[in-house]
Amino acid sequence: MNTKNFKGAKYLCLSIIISLALVLGACGNSNALVKQEGQSQTEKTQIVATTTMLADLSRIIGGDFVEVKGLMGPGIDPHLYQASAGDVSALQNADVVVYHGLDLEGKMGAVFDSLSEMNKTIIRAEDAIDRSDLLSDEEDVNYFDPHIWFDVSLWKDVTEHFAREMVLYDPDNASVYALNAENYLRELDEAELYIKNRVDELPEDSRVLITAHDAFQYFAHAYGFEVRGLQGISTDAEAGTADVRELADFIIDREIKAIFIESSVPHKSVEALQAAVRAQGFDVEIGGELYSDSLGDQASGHETYIATIKANIDTIVDALK
């Protein structure tokens, strides 16, 4: 059985995995997450999630049995986010803390360390992904690209992991978490097929994506694109004049039709790139705004993970066709 088929069989059998987890929990597995002593079985589990993607996932899998607070709103850059005193208090008082890891929330490391010392129940997206599926920074092979949600197959792994951890924490509602996860995994299958069908509309030589920062490598790897970002994997790194000039030359050489701004990154760097290209006599359009490190808001209609990734692929394909 190849890897793709194995992954498919794995998540289709999620209910079996959940049942095994319950057996292990009932046998007193010392590593299992358990509800805090004194917490009512009818009381909603209070979840605090860092990113908009994880808050969305928590609500979908937790359903009516959880209440979710997201720390970062739409358009917020998690690379640069610094926790306020109110955020720290919310994290300390949560029943379950959900964060991404892989240094995405790069300025919150000390906060997460303190929560671990408190024996706080933590679900970390990073733990869902096999190291062999992670992409490394070309300049530092020990630094992994955190933008895993741009590959829907990896987000399925995060979904499974979250559901299993919630079952171990709250086994009384295991069947609900399992059913919600199974239903959501089917929706993710449909979303992934939508992406692939839209990509097929583009000639292979047009599948070049240029954005403000290097967030789309997993997207490129999964769906057959070449990507370039003005900034590095983290928005902490700023693009210099040489970076703009080099990327402008690349756009002209490849006769690329459109480049893209991002919702969580200032637009000025991409606008400067467009100006540098036009100064050399070639016209490149800004093809639209992509959601990179956060989901959209309710006004946009793209406040869920699935709506966001569909909006992204529509923007990309429509601009590059």
Image: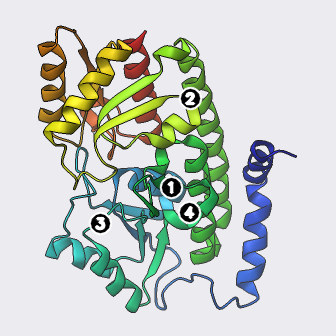
| Discs 3/4, front | 3
Q: Is residue 54 left or right of residue 151?
A: left
Q: Position of residue 10 (x, y in %)?
A: 77, 53
Residue that carries the numbered disc 3 in the rendered image: 106
**Tag nearer the camera, 2 or 3:** 2
* Image height of 213 relative to 141, above or below: above
Q: CA distance from mark 1 to mark 3?
A: 29 Å
C-beta proximity under 8 Å, tags 3 and 4: no
Whole-angstrom CA distance, mark 1 to mark 4, is 13 Å
Q: Nearer the viewer, mark 2 or mark 1?
A: 2
User: Mark 2 or 4 closer to N-term?
Assistant: 4
Give the alpha-carbon distance from disc 2 to disc 3, as whole Å: 29 Å
Residue type for callout 4: Phe
Residue ID at (35%, 60%): 104
Question: Could you say which disc has been placed on residue 224 in the image?
Answer: 2
Let me know if residue 307 appears in the view: no
Residue 246 left/right relative to 68: left
- Give the quadrant of residue 216: top left
Q: Earlier in the sequence, mark 1 or mark 3?
A: 1
Q: Is residue 75 left or right of residue 166?
A: left
Q: What secondary structure is marked by label 4?
A: helix
Whether residue 277 is visible to the viewer of this picture, yes or no, is yes
